[in-house]
Amino acid sequence: MVDNKKAKQPARRYYRKRVELFRLIDKIKLWPSRRGLLHGIKTVDIIGGQARITTHCNKTFLINDSRNSRAARWLRNKWFSGICGVCRVPDWKLAKYSSTQFKRHYGSALVDGSKVQSSEVQGSKD
Ligand SMILES: [Zn+2]
């Protein structure tokens, strides 16, 4: 039995540029450290207005839900200089990440139940 689909590139997925940071990291499970290393996220615990992130290399820290934070920008721009050797983010996850696009007026905002596919959505005020 050969599964031809396995070798294929992952589907392109689109997220809103202004997607909430917590939703985004909960979805993609990657974290760019200040030193530019990409870590795999093991758990995200939302506590009030903050989230406690635990990486696979067992670093734990609190973050704020800011779309404008360094990490949010780095994630959207896919800036990283290397992969954490302890987390060992799998290739399929990196491929999925690199095929992810962030658009201003198109894509999912990762809000439960909303699947915005159209670029015709009105009401954007920024
Ligand atoms: Zn790590």
Image (cartoon, grey):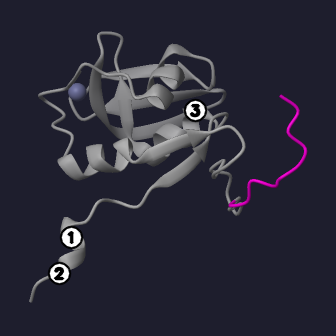
The secondary structure that dominates the magenta segment is loop
Q: Of circles 3 and 2, which is in front?
A: 2
Looking at the picture, tell me which residue is in the foreground, 20 or 108. Answer: 108
Residue at image coords 29%, 10%: 35
Q: Is label 2 in contact with label 1 (beta carbons under 8 Å)?
A: yes
Residue at image coords 46%, 26%: 77
Residue at image coords 58%, 46%: 15
**Which part of the image, by quadrant, shows the C terminus?**
top right
**Which residue is identified by label 2?**
3
Q: Give the Cα distance between marks 1 and 3.
A: 30 Å
**Which residue is identified by label 3?**
21
23 is higher (above) or lower (below) than 61:
below
**Which residue is identified by label 1?**
6
Residue at image coords 25%, 19%: 81
The magenta stretch spans which residues? 117-126
1 is higher (above) or lower (below) than 77:
below
**Label number found at residue 78:** none
State the image quarter where residue 75 is shown.
top left
Given the image, on which type of amino acid does mark 3 rest?
Leu
Looking at the picture, tell me which residue is in the foreground, 36 or 105. Answer: 105
Q: Is 30 inside the magenta-drawn segment? A: no
Spot occupied by residue 50 in the image (x, y as percentages of width and height): 59, 25
